[in-house]
Each structure stands twice: as structure tokens, then as C-alpha cells.
Image (cartoon, rainbow, N blue to C red):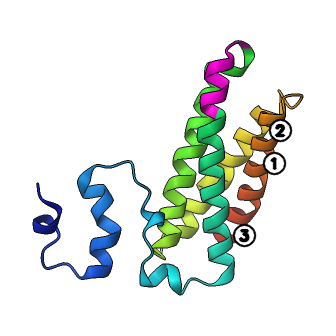
Amino acid sequence: MDVRHATQGVDQRASRTVEPYVRGAAARPIAMPTPQTQTLDREMQNCLDACTDCFETCERTLAYCLSKGGDHARPEHIALLIDCARICETSAGFLARDSPLHGAVCGACAEACERCAESCERLADDPVLKECADVCRKCAASCRSMAG
């Protein structure tokens, strides 16, 4: 389905937000500035940045852990990295759109980030996992403040 046809009649702002999902692309909606992202308050922008950073860090750490194998590739640890990356990506999207549900999503994101950080800290002698744990903790703190 052509994206222009699917979004015909929808205002331009919504079209830019929906377009990556209509295409089924893995593109993050936060990569496309909208009027909402330009008017986000400082706390929301900081949280969006923390979520984006955490998403990217967990994605890199996931690939690293799978390549290392052993304890790094424990199924529970890998699942937490995936969960954390996905909820951070989702949370960033809700924040970018200034969704009224962003607080609820940020609450779930904070929980996932804490769990991921704890899992990474079990292998904290590895600098890649230490960095991931630190980024997850920062994102969790920011999301907790947004969740209220």
C-alpha cells in the first residue's frame, strides 16, 4: 500500500509520525522531527534522549553478547536486553508524539531498564556491559520522573 494513499486526508504532522509504521519499517519515529518534538519541555526531551541512547546501547550490547556466547548469551539476559531496547524505542516514540499515555509507557520502561541494568551488572567486569548498565540506570531514572 502506498503511504501517501494510506495517509491521505491525515494532517502532515500525523503523517510524519505514522509513516514509518505504515511502511512496516524498523525506522524509529523519533528520527523525524515534528512540531511536537520541537516544543517538548526540557524534561521530556531529556527523557526522549535517554530512551534513544538506551535503545541504541541495548541493541549494540545485544549483538556483542550474542557474539561472546557463554554467560553473556544466557537466554534470560538476552531477553532483558531485547525487552529494554523495544520498550525504550516505544517510550521514545510516545514522548516524541507527546502522547497522553507517555507516563504509563515510561513507567514500564523504567522497570525494564532497571531489570536490564541488574542483569548487565552481573557481568560488570566487562566494560561493554558496565556501560549498558549505566545507560539503563540513567534511562530508568529519567523515565521514573516522567511516569510521576
* Extent of the magenta region: 62-70
Image position, residue 117 (x, y; %): 76, 41
Q: Which residue is mark 1?
A: 134
Q: Which residue is mark 3?
A: 145
As helix, strand or loop, the secondary structure at mark 3 comes to helix
Q: Name the residue rendered at 44%, 57% in the picture.
A: 28
Residue 29: in magenta span = no
Residues under numbered marks 1 and 2 in contact, where contact means CB atoms less than 8 Å apart: yes
Q: Relative to residue 35, is residue 30 depicted above or below?
A: above
Find the distance from the CA under tag 2 to the CA under tag 3: 23 Å
The single residue placed furthest to the top in the displayed view is: 70
Q: Relative to residue 11, is residue 122 depicted above or below?
A: above
Residues under numbered marks 1 and 3 in contact, where contact means CB atoms less than 8 Å apart: no
Q: Name the residue rendered at 83%, 38% in the picture.
A: 130
Q: Name the residue rendered at 78%, 52% in the picture.
A: 137
Q: Nearer the viewer, mark 1 or mark 3?
A: 1
Earlier residue among tags 2 and 3: 2
The single residue placed furthest to the right in the displayed view is: 125
Q: Which residue is mark 2?
A: 130
The single residue placed furthest to the bottom in the displayed view is: 39
